[in-house]
Image (cartoon, rainbow, N blue to C red):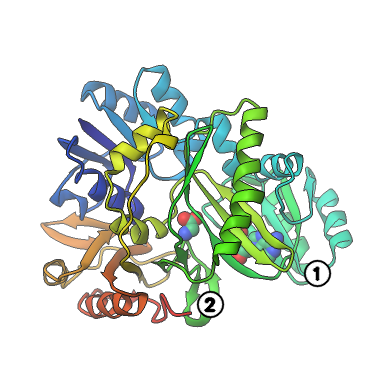
Amino acid sequence: MKVLVVGGGGREHALAWKLQQSESVTGVYVAPGNAGIKEFATAVAIPADDISQLKQFAVDRAIDLTVVGPDNPLANGIVDEFQQAGLKIFGPTKAAARLESSKSFAKEFMARYGIASPGFAVCDSANEAIRAVESFGFPTVIKADGLALGKGVVIAHNLQEAEQAIRRMMEERLFGEAGSRVVVEEYLQGTECSVHALVDGQNYCLFPTAQDHKALYDGNHGPNTGGMGAFSPSQTLSARDLALIERDILQPFLRGIQAEGITYQGLLFPGLMLTKRGPVVLEFNARFGDPETQALLPRLSSDLVELLEATMAGRLREVTPHWSSAASVCVVLASRGYPDRAETGKPIVGLPEVAALKDVLVFHAGTREQESRVVTAGGRVLGITAVGDSVLSARRKAYDAAGMIEFDGCYFRRDIGER
Ligand code: AMP
Ligand code: GLY
């Protein structure tokens, strides 16, 4: 079968890498892909959010399965459009993806089904939002309702910061329509973590734990990024926490989507806070995490195509994925300026040497080919993933490999996988 992966980051490189290992797969296309996937797949020059061109491509090439990486095409209904054209595609429909693409929808859904999440107010005007902030006290959390490239969340410590954030989102429309509505939220303290689960509408299948590092600098300082690295397994979640997550989040989630007639088939990746009153949902993601996926998939020994097909057919109950007991660590190499405006076009040195290392995988993210050289093309450039007997041993291998890569302005955290 021929598979199309939509997206061009490290997550999509890891998905494509794992999919092409499946015996049933004869060809992999990635749109738009990056310089790294060219070794085993075909990069297709269609942006991930150009749904009609992607659909045309899938029809023309008789693609048997499409797997969607990023949130945007899901929120814009790529799954619905492909399905209407009779194409098989992995991911939730537009209606189901609203659990990620509308924070107010997700909050109200959680409230209806007793899923713990921070106290909140949905506000349709700046004045309303400011009144809500005053009633919550500080710090308080202000979230653009829609998708905002992971930048739509502000933790305000005083009224001035809150007002500024609200005006930027609601009046200056920093995130466009995504900020026409905001959610003001109670600030929670605790330990952040997340889980990944396949959901087929009736059942779920939990992945092993993985954890990312969102802050730019070591020790979790500095601005939030898409993720500067990840490791698996994570020691943060105890067996008891996981049991609570299943009982108090995943099971009510399933009851909720069924009660509302939402056909949710795809990956569910809730961002959680472990608090004294148990696990609390900060957000739902309707897709694989990046870089979490780069740490998780090298540990999967089962066939990914079979798992995705079982999910799409509502047969998750019949499959049991196998995961290796090895640990993995993914260190993201970013370009100077990330997460704001990152430098691009810098030649990358050391890729063939690192590719030859044992237990090391290089997933490309922001790279492209220029005059037969690989150059940087985005904020997160590479994800260097290593596997080992323990997180410690995987860390050593990942950092040894990362140290062999050079490009102007290369930056990475030194504490990925450290507790
Ligand atoms: P989100 O996109 O909703 O996961 O929010 C991005 C980040 O903001 C999270 O990873 C947390 O670090 C932080 N955050 C979001 N909501 C809250 C909250 N209610 N209390 C404390 N921190 C939060
Ligand atoms: N690493 C966080 C995310 O993918 O949203």
How much space separates mark 2 and mark 1, taking CA atoms? 21 Å
Q: Which quadrant of the rendered structure holds the N terminus?
A: top left
Q: Which callout, 2 or 1, points at the residue further toward the start of the chain?
A: 1
Tag 2 residue: 220
Q: Amino acid at mark 2?
A: Asn
Q: Image quarter for residue 157?
A: bottom right
Write the residue at 65% across / 35% down: 255
Look at the picture and state if 101 lies above or below 133: above
Q: Quadrant of ligand 1?
A: bottom right
Tag 1 residue: 138
Look at the picture and state if 348 lies above or below 202: below
* CB within 8 Å, label 2 to label 1: no
Look at the picture and state if 25 lies above or below 352: above
Write the residue at 35% across / 47% down: 321
Write the residue at 29% across / 66% down: 385
Q: Count the numbered circles shown.
A: 2
Q: Is residue 152 visible?
A: no
- Residue 205, label in figure: none
Q: In front here: 351 or 374?
A: 351
- Secondary-structure class at tag 1: loop
Q: Crowdedness of circle 2 by 10 Å Cα count: few (<14), some, many (20+)?
A: few
Q: Amino acid at mark 1?
A: Phe
Q: Is residue 21 left or right of residue 318?
A: left
